Image (spheres, grey):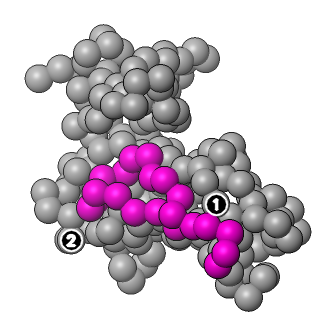
Amino acid sequence: MGIPIHPDPEVPVGADCSRCTPDPWWYGKTPGRIRIVFHLVDSCPGFPAFPNEIPFYLYQDTYDHCIWLDYKDFGGETYHFQWAARYSAVTVRITTLANVLAFSAAGPTCLPERLSNACWCTWHASHAGYANILDLPHPMIDYLATDLNFQPGARALYDIHQASDPDQLCVRLTGRNSKGSCLFLYEP
């Protein structure tokens, strides 16, 4: 059974995403807000610097509960961020530059994880890099917290980085009221 892990009370519980069956989130409900962080995304010549290493919060769409999105200003430009769970697709567009595509990636349906950028400089505003969706489904958090003997109140995933072994990721977990964190290798 393991240690009981509960959703972070700061994250509102969202509506059910009916296209994700079985639903991987807490108690059959999706998070109303997710975090996304980009790493090592290179801007193409003539385009503004991409916002790497900054956690952005996206909010569940009121009409399509399988999409999280928001507009954010960064470096004098406005970006539209979106994650569609049913495709596990992340897209970022620079709306102040004629909606040019700045990041595009897709992965396994309904599973937030590390997603690699598929853009290239011939047609887009960036290339290389990856995005991390930082709110893991509850069973994954429960397993990791139990395996590491975390106390109740363990937070969702903080960040993911590639490890030296290509089959592993370097994952950081922390307690909700803890000042510290634990960095460990994880095989998805």
What residue is shown with label 2? 19
Q: Residue at x 51, y 63 (%)?
A: 118
Q: Are marks 2 and 1 in contact (CB under 8 Å)?
A: no
What residue is shown with label 1? 127
Assign the magenta stretch its main secondary structure.
loop
Amino acid type shown at disc 1: His
Please identify the quadrant where the C terminus is shown.
top left
Please identify the quadrant where the N terminus is shown.
top left
Amino acid type shown at disc 2: Arg
In the image as oriented, which residue stretches furthest toward the front? 122
Q: Residue at x 53, y 58 (%)?
A: 117
Check if residue 71 falls in the magenta segment: no
Left or right of residue 26: residue 177: right
Res. 5 in view: no
Left or right of residue 48: residue 28: left
Q: Which mark is residue 175?
A: none
For this rendering, which residue is in front, 159 or 14? 159
Where does the image place residue 83, in percent across and percent down from the top left?
46, 66
Q: Where are the magenta residues, as a range?
A: 104-123
Res. 63 in view: yes
Where does the image place residue 45, in percent across and percent down from the top left?
82, 66
Q: Earlier in the sequence, mark 2 or mark 1?
A: 2
Residue 107 image-quadrant placement: bottom left
Residue 93 image-quadrant placement: bottom right
Q: Is residue 37 above or below residue 107?
A: above
- Camera-nearest label, 2 or 1: 1
Measure how far apart labels 2 and 1 are at the Cα level.
30 Å
Which SS class for mark 1? Answer: strand
Check if residue 106 falls in the magenta segment: yes
